[in-house]
Amino acid sequence: MKDNSLIYDNSLISQRDFINTILNPTPTEQLPIFEIKETPEFYCIYIDSFYGNKHILEICYKNNFLILKIKFKNTLKNSAHERIFYLLDIDLNNILLHDYKHNIKLIVPKVI
């Protein structure tokens, strides 16, 4: 089996995307900052520096991994900033999203 994917910045990308990322890096001031906190009832994920006019948030859950992908609107390059969290027994149907100014708070309830 031949796999030409590379891991860069916590993401699995193709060789072409890897080269494009190195040659045309995204300025760090545009990248959102992630933080996670856990309580007995839920996980709380904070995303700072999220701009609704610049970013799109995609959420998916595969094999106990919550994947948050932030894509940039209105850009020619197909770049994304991705964070992966290993979260067991969560209630996907009741995830809450609070958006205030340029910050997002995701509340992910646990299955008790």
Image (cartoon, helix red, strand yellow):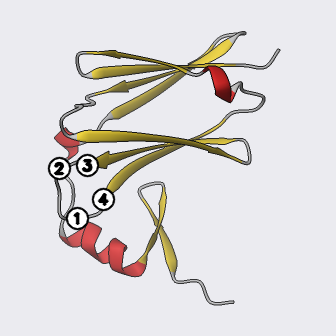
Which residue occupies the extreme top position in the image?
40
Sequence-first tag of 4 and 3: 3
Q: Which residue is mark 4?
A: 79
Q: Quadrant of the N terminus?
A: bottom right
Which residue occupies the extreme bottom position in the image?
2
The residue lying toward the viewer, choosing from 34 and 68, is 68
Sequence-first tag of 2 and 1: 2
Which residue occupies the extreme front position in the image?
93
Q: Are marks 1 and 3 in contact (CB under 8 Å)?
A: yes
Can you say whether 49 is above or below 26 in the image? above
Locate residue 112 relative to residue 13 in the image: left or right.
right
Mark 1 Cα within 10 Å, few/some/many (few <14, many 20+)? few
Horizontal and vertical percent position of residue 96: 52, 18
Horizontal and vertical percent position of residue 107: 55, 17
Can you say whether 50 is above or below 21 in the image? above
Locate residue 110 relative to residue 101 in the image: left or right.
right
Q: Which kind of residue does numbered mark 2 sit on?
A: Pro
Label 4 secondary element: loop
Horizontal and vertical percent position of residue 76: 18, 64
The residue lying toward the viewer, choosing from 33 and 101, is 101
Q: Which residue is mark 2?
A: 27
Mark 2 Cα within 10 Å, few/some/many (few <14, many 20+)? few
Label 2 secondary element: loop
Q: CA distance from mark 4 to mark 1?
A: 6 Å
Q: Which kind of residue does numbered mark 3 sit on?
A: Phe
